[in-house]
Amino acid sequence: MKKDIIIPTVENVYIAAVKEWNEDFQEDCWYAYLVNDTDNNLEMAIVVSKAYGFINGEPRNTGMFRNAFAEVAPKSAVKIELLENNVLQLDNEFAVTYFLNNTLYDKIFVFKTNTINDKGTRDIPVINKRGVLLK
C-alpha cells in the first residue's frame, strides 16, 4: 500500500527571511516570506510556523501561527510574519501546504538557531532583495 502513495517533491517554492525597515519599532526587522518561483498559482497555501529550542539551558517554545493565502501568484512572494529578535535564537519552523495543478504539496522548512543573520544573506529570487533563503 505504501508503495502506491505518491508524495510530490516541492520545487521552486521557498521560505525567505528578509530584513526590512519597521516603522512601528523604528529599526530593521526580519520578516518571513513565502516565495513562489513557479510559473503557476499556488492555491490555498497554508503556512504554520513555530519556534522552539533552548535558551540558557531552558526549553523554549512559541505558540503556533497559522497563515492562509487563497492564491500566491506565479513569480511572486507574500509576507508571512515578523520574526521577533527573541525567536531568532531558536529554531524557526515553517510548515507549508498548498495545491498546485490539483496536487497537494507539503514541506517543512527550518531556520536553525541563529542562522537568520546578516552574514547568511544572499539574493532572493522574485523579491529582488537580500535575505536568508531555505529551499
Image (cartoon, rainbow, N blue to C red):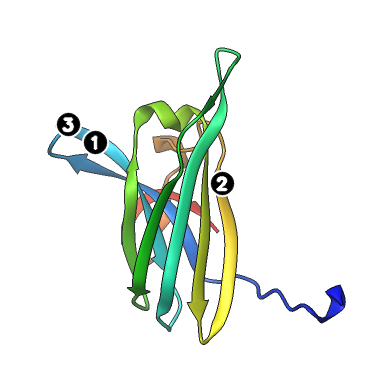
Residue 78 in the image: above or below residue 32: below
Spatial CA span between label 3 and label 1: 8 Å
Percent across and percent down for residue 58 are: 58, 15
In the picture of the structure, the residue carrying the numbered disc 2 is: 110
Mark seen at residue 80: none
Residue 89 in the image: above or below residue 110: above
Which residue type does callout 2 highlight? Val
Spatial CA span between label 2 and label 3: 26 Å
Callout in the foreground (3, 1):
3
Dots 3 and 1: beta carbons under 8 Å? no
Which residue type does callout 1 highlight? Asp
Residue 27 picture quarter: top left
Q: Residues within 10 Å of mark 3 (few under 14, many from 20)?
A: few
Mark seen at residue 25: 3
Mark seen at residue 28: 1
Picture residue at 53% right of the left edge, 86% below the top: 102
- The reply, left or right, for residue 8 in relation to residue 79 is right
Residue 62 in the image: above or below residue 106: above
Q: Tell me the element at label 3.
A: loop
Residue at the extreme top: 56
Callout in the foreground (1, 2):
2
Picture residue at 46% right of the left edge, 33% below the top: 62
Which residue type does callout 3 highlight? Phe
Percent across and percent down for residue 67 are: 38, 57
Q: Residues within 10 Å of mark 1 (few under 14, many from 20)?
A: few
Percent across and percent down for residue 43 are: 42, 77
